[in-house]
Image (cartoon, rainbow, N blue to C red):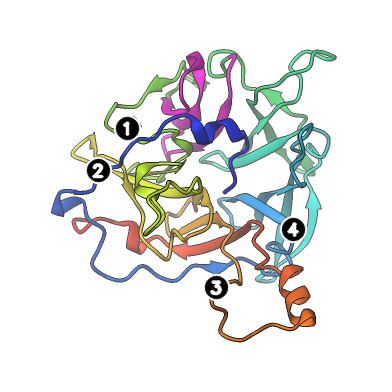
């Protein structure tokens, strides 16, 4: 994905562990090739990112972003419906469209949809950082947005959240004015508690954006950018794109982050991971495009214009892939 706050690129240049214990390596079977989700309907020539599938498989929420300017970074949450096995009827979510709303995620039971927003908490008081909000699913739609409250939200940026089957919330947050790191907020008696920072082992690659917990908490995905494992070949410079990382929980302990291989990551921005509630599908965002150097064939102007205004024009698209390749050899 693209970074929503460009200053995060320069936060920290940390190295993910280059080696990993054999028991933590991904299965030997090749990772399946990701496919663009609902091309020309959901994934279009627009800039889309950050998708989440409802537990019943009937709704998919995602984001559309306007071109970034020096004064605004407008993002709207949209959704698409699964009708008779096909995705159709894209709409802006009824609770979005006015502010910068992004990174929607369904709760474990699907009764709520959580998202990040810069909308004011107090009417008329502008807000620069993003907080976590949620809407409740109703018979004929959704409730008005509700601020999650100060037990979880901080005076700094809340970047993303996701949910384990237990209901516990894993989140990426810049709380305490620090680098964006990953935390967990336990669900106790129906209330989310103050977030606890995950271990320093997990938070060694920073910024740690888009925290995405597997439903069974066996692994944790996230996005980071500008790290030393992203050095451009033969140029010796760091390419400030974003890539996907994974940590595994083995016997109750998190492993060090490992950058995911191709074709999950690419030479373009990759990020915004989300796992379906059944644990079978990974959704993520990528800006991979049509171009290669040299091109397989020389393009004329008509062909070039078609590509530049097509789905693979270098703006974000949402991809889906089986999670089988993410599991460790012991799973």
Q: Which residue in the protein does label 1 denote?
A: 204
- Whichever of callouts 2 and 3 sits on the residue coming sooner in the sequence is 2
Q: How many marks?
A: 4
Q: Residue at x 15, y 49 (%)?
A: 21
Q: Are marks 1 and 4 in contact (CB under 8 Å)?
A: no
Badge 4 local density, few (<14 within 10 Å), some, or many (20+)? many
Q: CA distance from mark 3 to mark 1?
A: 33 Å
Compared to 113, does 127 lie above or below? Answer: above
Q: Which residue in the protein does label 2 denote?
A: 17
Q: CA distance from mark 2 to mark 3?
A: 30 Å
Highlighted magenta segment, given as a residue range? 155-184
176 inside magenta stretch:
yes
Badge 2 local density, few (<14 within 10 Å), some, or many (20+)? some
Q: Which of the 4 image quarters holds residue 93?
A: top right
Residue 160 vs residue 178, the one in the foreground: 178
Q: Where does residue 327 sit, x and y in percent of width and height? A: 30, 56
């Amino acid at each position: 994905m693209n970074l929503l706050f460009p200053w995060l690129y320069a936060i920290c240049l940390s190295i993910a562990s280059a080696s990993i214990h054999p028991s933590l390596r991904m299965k030997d079977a090749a990772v399946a090739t990701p496919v663009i989700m609902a091309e020309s309907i959901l994934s279009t020539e627009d800039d889309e990112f950050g998708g989440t599938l409802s537990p019943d498989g009937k709704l998919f929420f995602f984001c559309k972003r306007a071109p970034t300017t020096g004064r605004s970074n407008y993002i709207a949450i949209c959704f698409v419906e699964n009708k008779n096995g096909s995705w159709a009827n894209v709409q802006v979510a009824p609770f979005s469209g006015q502010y910068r709303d992004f990174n929607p995620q369904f709760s474990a039971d699907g009764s709520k949809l959580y998202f990040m927003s810069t909308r004011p908490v107090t009417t008329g008081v502008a807000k620069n950082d993003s907080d976590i909000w949620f809407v409740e699913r109703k018979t004929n739609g959704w409730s008005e947005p509700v601020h999650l409250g100060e037990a979880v939200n901080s005076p700094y940026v809340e970047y993303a959240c996701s949910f384990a089957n237990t209901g516990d919330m894993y989140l990426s947050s810049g709380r305490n004015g620090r680098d964006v790191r990953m935390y967990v907020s336990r669900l106790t008696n129906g209330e989310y508690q103050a977030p606890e920072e995950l271990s320093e082992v997990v938070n060694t690659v920073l910024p740690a954006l888009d925290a995405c917990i597997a439903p069974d908490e066996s692994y944790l995905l996230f996005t980071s950018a500008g790290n030393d494992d992203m050095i451009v070949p033969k140029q010796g410079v760091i390419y400030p794109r974003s890539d996907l990382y994974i940590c595994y929980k083995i016997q109750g302990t998190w492993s060090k982050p490992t950058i995911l291989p191709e074709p999950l990551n690419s030479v373009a921005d990759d990020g915004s991971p989300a796992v379906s509630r059944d644990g079978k599908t990974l959704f993520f965002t990528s800006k991979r495009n049509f171009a290669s150097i040299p091109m397989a064939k020389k393009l004329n102007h008509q062909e070039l214009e078609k590509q530049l205004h097509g789905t693979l024009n270098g703006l974000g698209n949402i991809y889906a892939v089986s999670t089988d390749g993410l599991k460790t050899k012991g799973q």
